[in-house]
Image (cartoon, coloured by chain):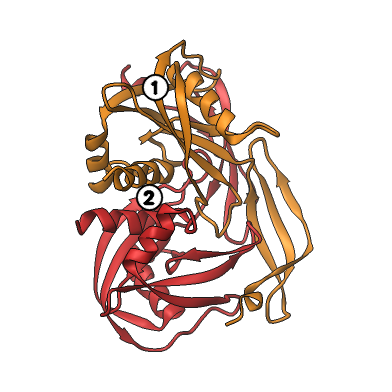
Chain colours: A red, B orange
Amino acid sequence: MDEKDLIEKEIKANTVYSGHIVNLRNDDVLLPNGVKSKREYVEHPGGATILAFDNEGNILLERQFRYPYREVIWEIPAGKLEKGEDPMEAAKRELEEETGMVAGKIEKLGLIYPSPGYTNEHLYIYLATDLKPTRQHLDENEFLSIVKMPFEKAVDMVMNGEIKDSKTCYAILKYAIMKK
Amino acid sequence: MDEKDLIEKEIKANTVYSGHIVNLRNDDVLLPNGVKSKREYVEHPGGATILAFDNEGNILLERQFRYPYREVIWEIPAGKLEKGEDPMEAAKRELEEETGMVAGKIEKLGLIYPSPGYTNEHLYIYLATDLKPTRQHLDENEFLSIVKMPFEKAVDMVMNGEIKDSKTCYAILKYAIMKK
């Protein structure tokens, strides 16, 4: 199949709800077979996240209550991009705000599409080393606790299903394969 | 920190938009510090996805246009759960509908939370082997092409960033570590 036969065209953008964090769209589209249809999806500003190693080979994980799941889960530091913000700068900013650590060295680890059927979120993933302490300064409505963990234990927790957050799983599994 | 000091309580559920696939909520909540706030998130029915191996060690990948990204991307077969549907049955159904293959053997590979800050989607991941051909029967508005690929090539494409879908990355990287 020619890949141009997969492409859907925007006929009309329809923002059906403008939220505080996300917007919901329900666009009129033209399907590859020429039929008119609708495509419903979330507009998201994008995010950045960071797998950070201290000098003892531990990674910094967070315990955070995620209201959509009504559950305290494991995640690496992350946050939404501010308007026009470079994703690497956002990752550094979130690391510092959430964990009180500054990364001496930071590099790209990847980019994921969390759930491409219904959200356009671009989630940029970084690797940080050479950490130096500064001070934690959480947002007003942000509550989380930081846990240092040996990297190999975190790999085990992805493999046994205790860690479920997609960006955290991706960063840990990808780095586990990279360093072999 | 005691983990009960992280928990946010629902004061009032507010569905601000009821969509075709998702709903948008903006609940009134009580934060751990006793302050009232809002939490905006997407209600999603959940999904199931399947890493399927043929008898030559190839996996079945799909090329699909994802309108939120305006891009044809790589994914493993997947779909939304129908109301009350068992996730493993949904994974089998999607494999058959999208690829025309029936799985002789199916087992759990994991569960991920795609983007826990703003969606409650539970995405169940399975591993299928012993495939037998039946017939493909795509949904009316579904357009995709199937590509068979040696598993090790797919691992390379996750590592080099060509595969970006989170469920596909998770399934491939997790299985790569399991089988070592």
Number of the front mark, 1 or 2: 1
At label 1, counting other C-alpha atoms closer than 10 Å, the crowd grade (few under 14, some 14-19, many 20 or more) is some
Please determine whether, in this image, residue A4 is positioned above or below residue B115.
above
Q: Amino acid at mark 1?
A: Asp
Return the residue nearer the eye: B176 or B78: B176
> Which residue is depicted at the point 66% across and 63% down?
B39
Disc number at residue B89? none
**Left or right side of A146 for B153:** left
Q: Residue A5, image x and y in percent?
A: 37, 20
Comparing B14 with A36, the one in front is B14
Name the chain letter of the residue that bears numbered label 2.
Answer: A
Residue A171: image location, x then y, percent: 34, 58
Tell me the quarter of the image containing the C terminus of chain A. Answer: bottom left
Give me the C-alpha separation between circle 1 and circle 2.
30 Å
Circle 2 residue: A112
Residue where numbered disc 1 is placed:
B130
Relative to A7, B5 lies left or right? right
Q: Does the image show residue A91?
A: yes
Quarter holding the N terminus of chain A is top left
Chain letter belonging to callout 1: B
**Residue B13 found in image quarter:** bottom right
Q: Is residue B142 left or right of residue A57?
A: right
Q: Position of residue A149 (x, y in %)?
A: 39, 73
Query: What amino acid type should be assigned to the residue bearing mark 2?
Result: Ile
Please, what secondary structure does the residue beneath circle 2 have? strand
